[in-house]
Every structure is written in structure tokens, then in C-alpha cells.
Amino acid sequence: MAGIVGTLATAAIACAALALAGYAAPNWLVLVATLAFSKGLVALGIVALMRGGLVSFGQGTFYCAGAYAAGMAMRSLGIGDATVLVALGAIAGLILGVIIAPLLAGYRGIFFATLTLALSMIVYGILNKTYSLGGSDGLNLHAPTFFGYHPPRSQDASYALFLFTSLVTVVAAALCRIHFDSVRGLLSLAARDNEIRVEYLGASVRWVNGINFVIAAVLGGVGGALSALSLGHIDPDFAFWATSGEFVFLAILSGYVSVTAVFVAAILLELVRSFSSQYFPNTWQGALGVFLLLIILFLPGGLGSLALRLRPSGAKPVQASADKSE
Amino acid sequence: MTALLETIGLQKAFGAVVAASDISVAVQRGQRLGLIGNNGAGKTTFVNIVTGHLKPDAGRVMLDGKNITGLAPRQVRRDGVSRSFQIPQLFTSLTLEQNLLMALAILREEGLSSWRSARSDARMAELDDLLDRFSLRPYRAQTIAVLPGGVRKLVDVAMAVTHQPKLLLLDEPTSGVAVEEKFPLMDVIMHAIEGTEATVLFVEHDMDIIGRYADRVLAFYAGRIIADGKPAAVLSNEEVQRYVTGGAA
């Protein structure tokens, strides 16, 4: 219980700090951070899967489902409130996750990764040819309201969306931290190590992976809805394999140890992308590749493991206790 | 009195190799049953069938009067059958403490939780008890990957004895352990099990271990049971000496 209280207290402080930082930051940085948090949520879902030993190359499916659910609700039903739209994104991810999880929970390794990738590409193909959903051009969205409040200026709207995204992100991150430290969260790490023993202790690895998959799907849906509101546009590229690959990139960059690291990695990546595409428009993907290579070579546990390395040796837990690092 | 474990006509073949041929055994509560036999004699197949890892081609496994034949290992575990492994099956990247916490947490009546911490006060108290019973306290914070083989064996058994199993199957608990450590290891295991209700079946190649810790012995050969009885009687059996012990009684 003390752990949960500590996590919630940290979350409250993080919310306040982000609100202040967003207020002081230039508008371009607020926009970058909003998008980074949205994508970080999707990557956090992959981290949940990674803790159980699985990597999904198809989180674009849920990212896209969340975005289109929010977009269609806005265009067809006239719903403009960000809270409702993000909730719809989460529900879309949940429904898809609950349907797909039982089909994929029995697969491991490259088979799981490939099947998730295949699903996302099917969705991509369907969306490209579904003209009622905008086809390959996608849909444009207008700025959302926030509990009935309609920000008067575009700068206010950016800040309001940043605040809302930060709140959703911090709540999701806190819930994930609590889950990761729980019995079921620890069981994911155990299942990654030795499925046979988990089964002989009386638990179902299929069930563990299935739940992680649904969590990842919901986070994907939420991230998709927030991205759609942030960009003001949705298109089938949300489900494209390169988009899913970007989330995997983020998850590898952050590692599965720390929840905070996922969002730090997301902001880093968005900043690198923004500056690189401005100054090195034709080579920035190469720079990202080198960056990832360096991380894998010198920081295989991701950015999250850096916190463990920097601790004084007396206070340093063994690497395997890393699930308590925050 | 009904037997705790009863196997009736178990059959299992892997292609042309018969691993279990009409294995019918009744094990009474509280017995310490040693299983002996050469490699490939069918001991581990028997353990694997009882624990749900293998489904027999024919025959039944009854636990406390309930048919558990073909149930998955996790279901068999929930019915009270637990096991350790010849090669310890542990969570090697986790600490010893986390391994034991997993074993303690999984079968709780309240079920698995996504909210409750794995480190509740009650569970930490159970963990302390387990660490003391198996003399594992000095290794508590170490990852399994860096622990010596004998300690891993103890962790493997300690994980199996959580939640008071009715039937505990130990697959070669002293294999891979230095000769001089075998008896101390078995002493720790048997001492830790004392006071539990568990009936114990253990697979063993060392006849000295069998002689000291078993009160009944089953000798396997080519998928059959060739002798069943008190250790002294089984180890002096002519067939056992010919096919299993090579004359060493």
C-alpha cells in the first residue's frame, strides 16, 4: 500500500511540474511534448508486453483504432470533448485487444511479432480503400473542447491539450507502475524467464500475456486518440508498419525497467526528429539508426537502466530488481 | 484408507520406446517414496505424467480420489501436486527473493492482483520463514544466475513446497551437486519438509540417499516397475541389482 501511495504522490507532483513547465515552455516545445507523450503511451504498452518477453510490431493497429474512433466520433456524432474522445479511443483499443488477445496469446517470439505486424498491415490496407473513413487522405479534425471549455486562442488550445495529455499520461504511467510492481506485474517478468515454472506454480502464461496485450491495446487506443487531437489529422499511416516500428524503437530506447524513461525517450526522439528533419532532411533516419545502435551496444537495458547505473553502489539493487527502480 | 496417489495402468510410449508400461502404484499419505532406475527407465516419465506435463496413452492418475489424468500442470498444482526439477526451473534474471515471492503469491486465495504489491507484510513474513527453513537467507538479494548449483536446487525445492502441497515430487534433488554436499542438501530439504503434510516422491540415483531418506522404494526398468517395497528389500532384489544398481546394494 505504501508503494501505491508513493506512486500516486509522485504522479501528483509530476502533474504539477508538467503544468508549470508547459506554461513556461515555448509553444513549439509544448506541441512536441504533447505528441511525444501520446506516442509514449503506445510505447508504454509495448513495454508492458516486453516485460512478458513479447514484442509487438503491430501496435499501429490500436493506435489507429483509437485515432479513428475519436475522429469518427467528432465528425459523425459531433462529440468535441477531449475526455470523451480519448475514452472512446481507449474503448476501441480495449474491444480490439480483447478480440485479438486470445488469438495471439499462444504465440511467442518472431511469430507473435510477425502476426501483430500482419494485422496492422491488414488494417492499413482496409483503411486505404475505405472512402467513408477518408481513404488514403484520411480525416481532418478540429480542436477539441475540455470539459466544455473552448480555448479562445490557438496557443491556449495547445497548452490545454498539453495539460490534458500530461494528465492522461501521468495517470496511465502511475497505473502501469502500480501494475508492474504488483503480483501480476512480477509474474510477467517470471513468465519471460521461465514459462514452464510459471505453469508449475499454478498460473497461466497465456493469461498473463493476454492481459498484457489488452493493456497494450488500451494504451495504444488512448495514444492514438491523443495523437489525432494533437495533429488534427488522421490517415492510414497510423497503422503503417513504420509507425509501429517507431513505437518499438521507443520501447527499446527506454527499456522495460522504468515507466518515466518511456516518456523521456519519447521526448528525446521527437526532438531529434524535429531538429534532424529541419537540418538534415534526407539523413535523419540514418542518424536515428546510429542512435539506436549505440543504445543497444552501450545501454542494452535502455535509458531506464541508466538510473540504476548512476546510483551509489551501496544503494544499487541487483539488475533483476529493476522493477522497483522508480 | 484411500491412497493419496493412485496410478492405474499407465502407458506411455515415444515412438518405439516404451517409457511407461502398465504402471499401477498406490502411495499412502505421509510416505517418503524413492524412485530408482537407470536413465530411460521411466522415472521422470512417471513424474511428468503425474504432474500433468505428459498425457498418458492409457491409464488414470487419481489424487485423493479425484481423476487428474491429463490436466494441465497448473491445474494439477492447484489440486495439491507440486514438483521440483532435475535441472532447476527458476526465474534466472530475478532475485532469489523474487523467485520465492512468485511461488508464494501465485496460489493465494484472493488470486493474482494487478494492484496489490508483491511485497505485502504477510507475504514477506512467509518469505522469511521459507528463507530460514531452507537456509537461503544469505542469498536473498542475489540473482539466480549467479548462485551456485546446490543453492539453486534448494530454491527449486523451496518454490515447490509453498502452499502446503499434498504431494511433492522431487526429480533428482541431488543431481549435479558435489558428493560431500548431497547429504547436507537432503538434510536441509527433509528438515524443511518436516511438519508439512506433504507426501514425498523423489527420483534418485544415489542408493545411499535412498537408503537414508526413503521408507519405500520403486525400482523402474524399461518402463516397468520391477520392485516395490522397503529400501533394504528392494536394493537386495536380484533384478534390481542386475538392472539398476549393478550389484551395489
Image: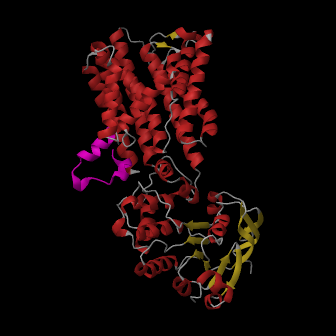
Q: Is residue A83 visible?
A: no
Number of labels in the image equals 0
> Quadrant location of the C terminus of chain B?
bottom right
Residue B119 horizontal/vertical position (percent): 42, 56
Q: Is residue A308 shown in magenta?
A: yes
Query: Against A224, is B236 above or below?
Result: below
The picture quadrant where one finds residue A252 is top left
**Is residue B208 positioned above or below A92 on the image?**
below
Q: Is residue A28 magenta?
A: no
**In this image, A35 relative to A88: left or right?**
left
Predominant SS of the magenta segment: helix
Quarter of the image that includes the N terminus of chain B: bottom right
Residue at image coords 66%, 77%: B220
> Which of the 4 image quadrants contains residue B96?
bottom left
Magenta segment: A303-326
Q: Is residue A90 visible?
A: yes
Tell which residue pokes out farthest to the left in this image.
Answer: A312
Considering depth in this image, is A296 or B111 the residue closer to the camera? A296
Q: Residue A205's x, y, as percent? A: 57, 49
- On screen, residue B174 above or below B55: below
Residue under the image location 35 percent in, 45 percent down:
A6
In front here: A97 or B45?
Answer: B45
Left or right of A172: which side holds A308?
left
| Residue at horizontal 47 percent and vertical 19 percent from the top | A82
Left or right, B59 with respect to A2, comes to right
- Residue B132 location (% of width, % of height): 40, 73
